[in-house]
Image (cartoon, grey):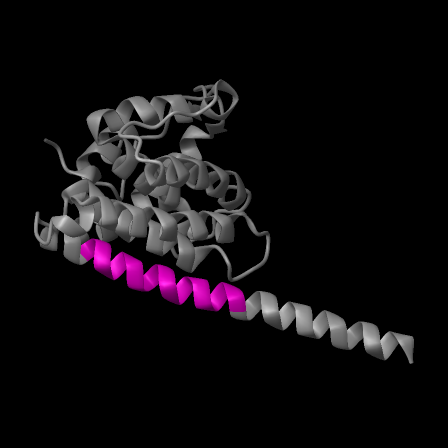
Amino acid sequence: MARLSQELARFACLPAHPEQPEPYPEGSPPIRLEEILKLAGERSFGLFLAVLSFPSALPLPAPGYSTPFGVVILLLALQMLAGRTTPWLPPWVLQTSIERKQFQKWVQAGIPWLQRIEKVACPRWQPVCTSRLGQVWLSTLISLMGISMIIPVPGTNTLPAMGVFVTAFGLLEEDGILCSLGSLICVAAGLLTTSILVGLWLGGTTLLDWLRR
């Protein structure tokens, strides 16, 4: 089975040398989530979650995508929590689209990082990924990270997306160590998001008190 970096490179029409991408022809239709779901195949949840969190997990910004992708990640995580083995999304969600050139830029920027992770990923500590208890724990964390990505506040998107990506990649490879690392990132992201929201609430309360004087 092809590795995720190879799947994404082929899907994004990248040549053998990613630093010289072959641009999509002018007028190419955007990529729909339905196409990504077909790419995922039997690895649906892991690959789908990895691809959706990928843009926001990159050092490059992904303006406008964190919130809608966060909604889809939340929907998928709730289905995992309920014990579904294959994802279901309403037709209007599957028609959500991404500009092909934008997708190609994300893949081009992320493949070097992805290949580094693939070098160390392998099936180990599999109960973390495959046991019901492990799946409940991971899907709960991913759900919370999806909610964080939905919040349109700076600082609440990138680290949660990183947590989802590492966890999803661990699920994809049945690598319990990667899933555990992803869990730690998710917990750190949750603390960061909580701190930011509490800080905004306290700051807003202080400002209102000052204005009332």
For the residue pair 155 and 27, the one nearer the viewer reads as: 155
User: Hey, which quadrant is residue 132 in on the image?
Assistant: top left
**Would you say residue 170 is visible in this rendering?**
yes
Image position, residue 151 (x, y; %)? 57, 52
Image position, residue 75 (x, y; %)? 44, 36
Residue ID at (45%, 41%): 74
For the residue pair 53 and 76, the one nearer the viewer reads as: 76
Residue 146 to residue 87: above or below: below
Image position, residue 141 (x, y; %)? 37, 53
Image position, residue 194 (x, y; %)? 52, 66
Tell me where the magenta segment starts and ends, as one range: 178-194
Residue ID at (59%, 65%): 197
User: Hey, which quadrant is residue 174 in on the image?
Assistant: top left
Residue ID at (51%, 59%): 156
**Would you say residue 169 is visible in this rendering?**
no
> Is residue 191 a member of the stretch shown in magenta?
yes
